[in-house]
Image: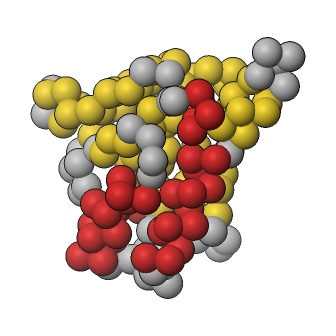
Amino acid sequence: MKGLVQRVNHASVYVENKLISSVSKGLLVFVGIFESDTEETLQKFCQKVENLRIFEDTNGKLNLSAKDIGAEILLISNFTLCTKAHSGNRPSFSAAANKAKAERLFESMPQFFTIQTKLGVFGADMKIQSEADGPVNLILEI
């Protein structure tokens, strides 16, 4: 499983110009699910995201997690994170989970978080608006 974790002041996702989900201060997380991923992988990923210490404490140090500050999380399915682009200019997505498996795992993610978590729409053409905070961006692989 691979994720692009971005600290945001706010983020929203739209499908066909309709607001689907939005969060205030928290994390915008793009999630790529591989064929090799399992529910165990998913659980580890979610726990890691929730507990990443990427928010400042009173001394300005990155010492607090989304869980610590009661932040929100917006999850966006993104199979293009599973790309292999080692040779040539056309990326390969062969390592990505098949649609049924990826959708099942993605839709189950909120149950593994203890803080407010919202989802984009799996497989949809989504428009995401966000305001980065920092910027703080991490690539997380489990």
Q: Which image quarter holds the C terminus?
A: bottom right
Q: Which percent across, then down, holds residue 33?
A: 45, 68
Query: In front: 33, or 91?
Result: 33
Judge left or right: residue 119 versus residue 75: left
Q: Which percent across, then down, holds residue 76?
A: 38, 47
Query: In front: 59, or 74?
Result: 59
Q: Is residue 88 visible?
A: no
The answer to which quarter of the image holds residue 7 is: top right
User: For the point 31% across and 45% down, which residue is it?
Assistant: 119
Q: Which percent across, then down, holds residue 84?
A: 58, 70
Residue 132's place in the image compared with 112, above or below, is: above
Q: Please name the colour scheme applied to the rendered image.
A: secondary structure
Query: In front: 49, or 121?
Result: 49
User: For the point 39% across and 38% down, which residue is it?
Assistant: 116
**Count of numbered labels shown in the rendering:** 0
Q: Which image quarter holds the N terminus?
A: bottom right
Residue 59's place in the image compared with 129, above or below, is: above
Q: Can residue 118 be seen in this view?
A: yes
The answer to which quarter of the image holds residue 105 is: bottom left
Q: Which percent across, then down, holds residue 71?
A: 51, 30
Residue 141's place in the image compared with 41, above or below, is: above
User: For the point 32% across and 27% down, which residue is it?
Assistant: 22
The answer to which quarter of the image holds residue 61 is: top right
